[in-house]
Image (tube, rainbow, N blue to C red):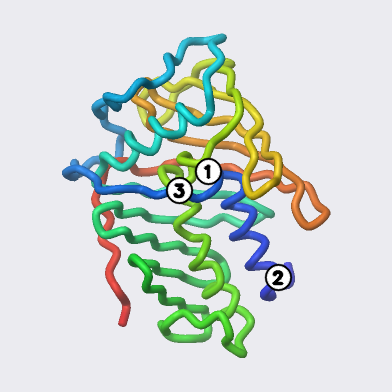
Amino acid sequence: MRVNKWGVGIVLTATVLLTGCTAGAEEPAEDEPTAAAEETTAPESDCPELTEGATVDGTALGACITEAMTDTAGYQAKTSILGMDTTARYNPATDAVETITPMGLLILIGDDAWVKTPTTDWQVADPNSSDPIVAALSSGAATAAGTDPATAAGALTGEFTVTGTGSRLGQDVYLVSGTSEAQGVPVDVVFEVTDDYVVLATTGSTEAAGQMIETSLEITEWDVEQDIVAPL
């Protein structure tokens, strides 16, 4: 694959489109050092009942997912899109995201961002850099937070149907399917949601830049504090 600014940008943008739009994520609770998914307290808000065959409102479901997934010490996720695997770590307590791609690394803490490519050291993000990879990774800082499932869920819309059940990280999950709209683009998605509204995996498909894009996201470590620090 030719690596250029467009290539990096479409991967980051498509990831946001396929996990949802952006919304605000709040403070987490304490950490629990285990790689397996732990039972969390279900949100106290009026959340839709997840039973096979049920139809649920995307807005209500998204609010419950966001609330449940910010009640965690942190987590890791793996995303596959356009033939590339990306690993991301999230720490809600410090509003921090670290993204590891074949093209380089991105750390975002609050409003501050840093990038590193295979041929450069860590540097402050610069979307106007003469290096196209640095510029693309830097531009990706604006969308990196939106790849967080907890953040993305806050903007879900439309109706979803519980189409089946499965298992992830040792927990039972409901398969919640539907079409949502992200930034004006229709996205067909399937969420794997626990009974306390934690999303442990998603798959999605949409058309962007004239091509069909499919992606998958899988939580690989749940409720484990992620040590993400400023590299400079």
Say above or below: 107 vs 55: below
Q: What's the distance in space between the residues labelled 1 and 3, CA to CA? A: 18 Å
Labels 2 & 1 near each other (Cβ < 8 A) = no
Q: Nearer the viewer, residue 67 or 129?
A: 67
How crowded is the residue under tag 3: few (<14 C-alpha within 10 Å), some, or many (20+)? some
Q: Say which element carries label 1.
A: strand
Q: Say which element carries label 3.
A: loop
Q: Nearer the viewer, residue 124 or 27?
A: 27
Q: Position of residue 61 (x, y in %)?
A: 46, 27
Q: Which numbered marker is on residue 23?
A: 3
Q: Residue furthest right?
A: 210
> Mark 1 = which residue?
217
Q: Nearer the viewer, mark 1 or mark 3?
A: 3
- Mark 3: amino acid: Ala
Question: In screen coordinates, is 96 left or right of 123?
Answer: left
Q: Nearer the viewer, residue 59 or 80?
A: 59
Image quarter of the N terminus: bottom right
Say above or below: 61 vs 131: above
Q: Nearer the viewer, residue 116 or 102?
A: 116
Q: Position of residue 123 (x, y in %)?
A: 42, 84
- Mark 1: amino acid: Leu
**The quarter of the displayed image where residue 169 is located:** top left
Labels 1 & 3 near each other (Cβ < 8 A) = no
Q: What's the distance in space between the residues labelled 3 and 2, CA to CA? A: 25 Å
- Mark 2: amino acid: Trp
Residue shown at 49% from the left, 68% from the top: 141
Lower position in the chain sequence, tag 2 or tag 1: 2
Q: Position of residue 134 (x, y in %)?
A: 55, 80
Question: In screen coordinates, is 83 left or right of 88?
Answer: right
> Mark 2 = which residue?
6
